[in-house]
Amino acid sequence: MGTADLHTHTKYSGLSRVLFLKIPDSVTEPADLVRAAEARGLDVLCVTDHNGIRGGLEARKHARSVEVVVGEEVLTSEGEVLGLFLTEEVPAGLTAAETIDIIHGMGGVAVAPHPFSAHCAALGDRVLSLDLDGVEVFNAFHRDRYSNDLALSKCSGSGKALTGGSDAHAPMMVGDGVTTFDGTTAEELRKAIVARRTGYGGEYTTIRNVVWMTTLLVLDIQRVIASSMLRGAVPEDTEYSRALFAMKRSTKLVSLGGTFMFLLPPTAFVASVIGDRLNTSRARDNWLRHNGP
């Protein structure tokens, strides 16, 4: 059986909102993502940055023993859709059905990521009626477990491929969740998804790696802000670098102070645990709304 990670992110994945703050979704270099996939022995790596395919195109240049699939996590007006095997960028903001049609029109496959997430843009029950090829029933980053259990209970027997992915936002998370299939190549993976002959598996991302992920984000925010304060420095070609360069100097100084405090032990660990518990509480409430106590 081949193994593929269908859901990963690089530094080209844009910005995420945490409370009132906008932070990088990921700061992972595409080359580092590929190296992590090869170290885990994956056969196929799908790079699915938010609303863009540049990360996948860049990652493909560095692949040796792993085959890279260019993908995109597209924000539709109804929730997110993973487009895999893409040849061009899919525009955000369309309906889910329109987005799926565009993906199919370029020979790609459409998968619903974290369809019952309580904290990400999710399709919910729409997955049962949309012309999706697959549904992600194991997302390693959704440590609450309720979201995955709900996806599996709702979508088993739906006639769609059941898939897994890490939703990696840092290299150490790659391969935590996987899709299994007959064969080892990207084309064999595509055929398995279309034929609804896939498996899923993996282990939930550890809280330790969640802490490492947030630490890497904060360190890179500090690096970019410090660079932006140097005379003559120019932003890197990423959305978050341009956003940080555009901040007022006073805001940059406050951000540097705040991020420094975050890195003092045990702040990063405590913040990660609190965030984890809040996500689990929301996911449990979502589970109860669908299934009752």
Image (cartoon, rainbow, N blue to C red):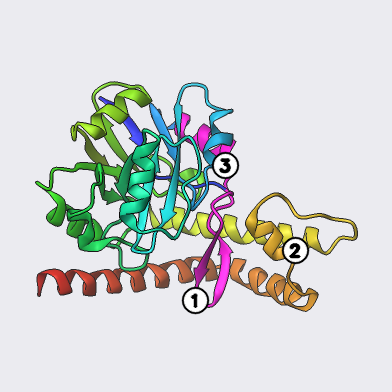
Start-end of magenta stretch: 11-38
Spatial CA distance of label 2 from label 3 is 21 Å
x then y, percent, for residue 194: 24, 33
x then y, percent, for residue 136: 27, 48
Q: Which mark is residue 19?
A: 1
Q: Residue at x 52, y 48 (%)?
A: 52
Which dot, 2 or 1, sits closer to the camera?
2
- Which is more N-terminal, label 3 or label 2? 3
- Which is more N-terminal, label 1 or label 2? 1
Tally of marks: 3
Identify the secondary structure beneath mark 2. Answer: helix
Q: Residue at x 21, y 43 (%)?
A: 162
Check disc 3 and report the residue beneath it. 54
Q: Mark 3 Cα within 10 Å, few/some/many (few <14, many 20+)?
A: many
Residue 88 can be seen, yes or no: yes
- Which is more N-terminal, label 1 or label 3? 1
Amino acid at circle 1: Leu
x then y, percent, for residue 219: 65, 58
Residue 6 can be seen, yes or no: no
The quarter of the displayed image where residue 44 is located: top left
Q: Residue at x 55, y 35 (%)?
A: 57
Q: Which mark is residue 245?
A: 2
